[in-house]
Amino acid sequence: MREPAAGYSEEFEVNMGPQHPSTHGVLRLLLRMDGEIIKNAEPHVGYLHRAIEKICENRTYPQCIPLLDRFEYVTSMSTEEVFCLAAERIAAIEVPERAEYLRIIMLELDRIASHLIFLGTFSLDLGAITPFLYCIRERETIMDLFEMTCGQRLTYNYIRVGGVSQDIPEQFLPLARKFVDTFQHRVDDYEALLTENPIFLARTKNVGIVNKQVCLDYGASGPVLRAAGVEWDLRRDDPYSIYDRFKFEIPTGTVGDVWDRYMVRVRELRQSNEIVRQALDQLPTGDIKAKMKPLFKPPVGEVYARIENSRGEMGCHIISDGSTKPYRLKLRGGSFCHTQLIPEVAPGIMIADLVAMFASLDVILPEVDR
Amino acid sequence: MADSGTIIRLLVEKFPSQVEAIELNPKQTAVQIDPRIVVAFFEFIKTHPDLKMAYLSSISGVDMTTNIDIVYFLSSIEYKHKLTVRTKVNRKGGKIDTISTVIKGANWFEREIWELFGVEFLGHPNLTQFLLPDDWDEGPPMLRDWTGRNFVKMPEIGG
């Protein structure tokens, strides 16, 4: 933290956003500045509020899924998974083996795609353009895999209550295997560009620290929490689906600065890649959807399901009144809590560092506004 | 890690007449609490050495048509156990103490419930316009009987 020179400064307000290249969506930050140093930052959200929760109360369960894809469009697979997980728990549906494996493959590929978007835009925000091109190149293969499976490249509508919508096509497995084999070397390439780069280190080391205490106070989760040194991953600590069958490590950082958050995500790329490899090796044959009545009508009940997505804990609270529509659907995303902690950590840093810090939180705004 | 029975026993011992266990589903330990004790309750589960539930996943508001339920989801990062806490407030002019003084992360969740359900959180530092437009004047939209902005109820399918 830097103290302003005495006697020469006057505080003023800067409006950052809502349309700003580094706010990743539409976030407005009202900054109170003293020279270049931030005194106070106040996030204003709601520009992307689409009342998803209200609309879902008025739609049947299958109709909710494509809408929920818009809740967190960078990793749509995870929004589908958390909703279906909650619905399956209420209705006590057993998902067939093969469907579980397909879901894991898709979820982890989606995590890789999301972290690649993070890596690309984060380095763009810091002024490095090449990593973005590399990241998008690899993400393209994942998009191709999704497209050949469900016809969509962004909002998939693939995971359904009780299973998945369709089986993978023939050409999926060879392409996925090729991707898994080459991807680890691609991560080496990204690291060669960034990890030890002196300019990158100057922009990220000991910058924008979100320490352990702030994380715990504000309910931060995912890479942000792990970068602060807390080993907490719902895939291991509150297991769902079949994650207990795979071997993977949970990378953590030490101080919780921008570099730690970057490093945690890069190491997660490798771990997700390993999970996809294991899932491809173990993929069984069989049904892809549980036997269900055509009209999905869960019994009266209430459930809160949560999963670990690329941004942290994603939760879905469903209350069913026994009809074909959810009585209440509440969504929780990691970004909500991560945006909330900005006023706590922003004071004392400079605008350029705020951009780096905000990019490293990997917030996407539709998840905050819903 | 404390199991479901231990958690409930600890809570009922501390707040004998204000806390009772409820059944939601086998994976969730849940209690119903008196809305007047929220602050003391969350202080207790956050600081008790066997509970340490300081991680707030989410707070939901639910319009049950007779009243509004506030549902808190907590877990402990140290022990990996979790707890669902339910409480009721009045539907019209409902008031409840804020827990953002105990768990800072509750701030925005409560602000959202204030805006979408009209529940007032006493002692909340920042109950101001949040998700809805600045000029919103149609009342809390998440109430079940809300109609406005051309809201059309979809017909029931399959009966």
Image (cartoon, coloured by chain):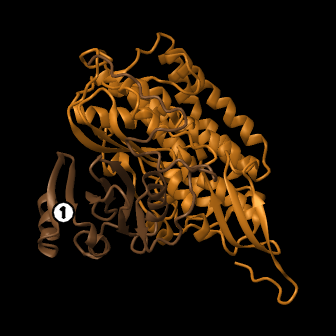
Which kind of residue does numbered mark 1 sit on? Answer: Ala
Q: Position of residue A126 (x, y in %)?
A: 76, 53
- Is residue A242 shown to the viewer in this render? no
- In depth, the one of A270 and A347 nearer the eye is A347
- Is residue A41 shown to the viewer in this render? yes
Side (left or right) of A171 relative to B120: right
Q: Is residue B85 above or below residue A151?
A: below
Q: Which chain is orange?
A: A
Q: Which residue is mark 1?
A: B2
Q: Chain of mark 1?
A: B
Q: Residue at x 63, y 53 (%)?
A: B134
- In depth, the one of A361 and B59 nearer the eye is B59
Question: Which quadrant of the structure image shows residue B86?
Answer: bottom left
Question: Which quadrant of the structure image shows residue A317?
Answer: top left
Q: Position of residue A176 (x, y in %)?
A: 51, 23
Q: Quadrant of the N terminus of chain A?
A: bottom right
- Colour assignment, chain B: brown
- In depth, the one of A162 and A130 nearer the eye is A162
